Image: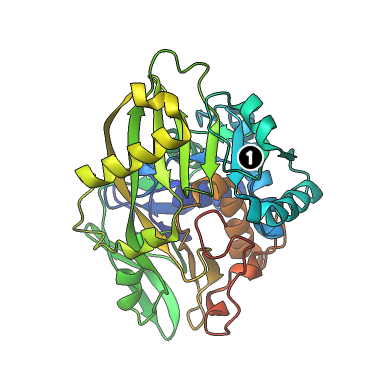
């Protein structure tokens, strides 16, 4: 175990992809006395259970810019950061019903406007891209040939390793029990291994943010829910490996995995109704969930009827009212910042989030790679929720 430290310039709470990305980007900017505190091990929370899809298909310009910036990092991770993010260029396909084609075309035009390599495809073209796909109920789709998926744990460990090489300290197995304040100013954190004095603290605490916020009188508008993922064994004749695919008609997603597996999950916003206590929830799938997901997979990919499911898992989502994150200096507290509420689509944005939060902390503002003020804490009280073209959903 890393030797305990008792002073820092910045303490980051949370060792997922966000916390480690922020640590790396701060250290890269010359903030050497950065301490990241993780209660378990790196990527042991939501990050390690992420499907880790890398796509740029967003319906708001700000998110599309952030996704494009992050994609370029994932695409060249060894040179841009160091280490291995496990990025696989599988291609990314979206399918929508006839009633949603115009909205889809609007999103594609927005994405193309910021530099994303994407295009509209007809149902016939979708079939040519993905021959095993049933396309009769689609009105069209969007195709990103460069996108794919990555390794969430490998990405997190790589960010942490590079942060450490640049002078940061990574404390695992260390629980933060309180944030220390004096006169509205941050003074540090209290942990299971002693206090750490620091003028700046960053919460990258996911589903645990509301509990920590309660201790200092901050009410985060976040609900914790279970996101379920089924692993399906593809039959040998299901070749080549499929693209990453988002099905707006059935509200499902599919992602290839090694070992001739496909991961199957939901984009239905009703996922947020499966509320959990993040410290006491089951990460197993019920038989009913496995049957439902496998049935939908077979409807979309009939060839999967010759496959079978091989279990799965559930991970936690920290969902905000508009399904977008909160990236801000917390009002009323000098030196306290948060990067929370990623609502199931944070991993793909983690390189941009790290850069943006590092700029906010060191410069007091951030407009590149995108304007961070869109994600301010007070937007909910102001009634200025982020309006995505697809409504309030994990797709954004």
Q: Quadrant of residue 257?
A: top left
Residue 208 seen in the figure: no
Residue 265 vertical placement versus 364 (above, below): above
Compared across the picture, whether 358 is left or right of 278 comes to: right
Q: Position of residue 101 (x, y in %)?
A: 69, 51
Compared across the picture, whether 356 is left or right of 329 comes to: right
Q: Position of residue 342 (x, y in %)?
A: 48, 58
Secondary structure under tag 1 reads helix
Give 309 or 60, whichever is nearer the viewer: 309
Give 303 or 169, whichever is nearer the viewer: 303
Picture quarter with the N terminus? top left
- Residue located at (57% from left, 33% from top): 148
Picture quarter with the C terminus? bottom right
Residue 207 seen in the figure: yes
Q: Quadrant of residue 230?
A: top left
- Residue located at (33% from left, 65% from top): 273
- Residue located at (18% from left, 58% from top): 280
- Residue located at (38% from left, 18% from top): 235
- Number of numbered markers: 1
- The residue to which callout 1 is attached is 71
Q: Please identify the residue farthest to the right as the structure is shown.
A: 113
Residue 216 vertical placement versus 195 (above, below): below
């Amino acid at each position: 175990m890393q030797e305990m430290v008792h002073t820092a310039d910045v303490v980051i709470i949370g060792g997922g992809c966000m916390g480690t990305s922020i640590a790396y980007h701060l250290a890269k900017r010359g903030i050497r006395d950065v301490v990241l505190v993780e209660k378990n091990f790196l990527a042991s929370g939501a990050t390690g259970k992420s499907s880790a899809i890398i796509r740029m298909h967003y319906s708001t310009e700000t998110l599309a810019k952030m996704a494009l910036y992050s994609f370029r990092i994932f695409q060249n991770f060894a040179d841009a950061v160091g280490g291995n993010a496990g990025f696989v260029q599988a291609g990314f396909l979206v399918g929508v019903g006839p009633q949603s084609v115009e909205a889809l075309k609007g999103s594609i035009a927005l994405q193309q406007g910021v530099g994303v390599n994407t295009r509209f495809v007809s149902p016939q073209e979708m079939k040519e891209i993905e021959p095993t796909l049933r396309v009769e109920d689609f009105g069209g789709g969007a195709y990103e040939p460069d996108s794919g998926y990555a390794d969430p744990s490998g990405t997190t460990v790589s960010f942490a390793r590079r942060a450490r090489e640049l002078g940061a300290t990574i404390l695992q197995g260390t629980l933060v029990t309180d944030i220390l304040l004096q006169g509205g100013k941050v003074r540090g954190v209290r942990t299971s291994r002693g206090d750490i004095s620091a003028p700046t603290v960053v919460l990258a605490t996911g589903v645990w943010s509301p509990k920590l916020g309660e201790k200092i009188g901050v009410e985060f508008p976040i609900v914790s829910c279970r996101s379920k993922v089924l692993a399906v064994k593809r039959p040998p004749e299901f070749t080549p490996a499929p693209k990453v695919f988002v099905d707006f008609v059935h509200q499902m997603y599919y992602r290839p995995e090694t070992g001739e597996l496909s991961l199957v999950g939901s984009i239905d916003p009703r996922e947020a109704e499966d509320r959990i206590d993040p410290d006491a929830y089951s990460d197993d799938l019920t038989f009913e969930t496995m049957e439902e997901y496998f049935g939908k997979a077979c409807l979309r990919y009939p060839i999967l009827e010759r496959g079978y499911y091989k279990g799965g898992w559930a991970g936690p989502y920290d969902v905000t009212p508009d399904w977008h994150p909160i990236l801000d200096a917390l009002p009323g507290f000098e030196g306290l910042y948060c990067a929370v509420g990623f609502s199931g689509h944070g991993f793909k944005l983690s390189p941009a989030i790290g850069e943006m939060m590092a700029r906010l902390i060191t410069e007091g503002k951030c407009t590149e790679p995108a304007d961070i003020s869109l994600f301010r804490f007070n937007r909910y009280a102001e009634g200025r929720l982020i309006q995505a073209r697809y409504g309030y959903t994990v797709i954004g």
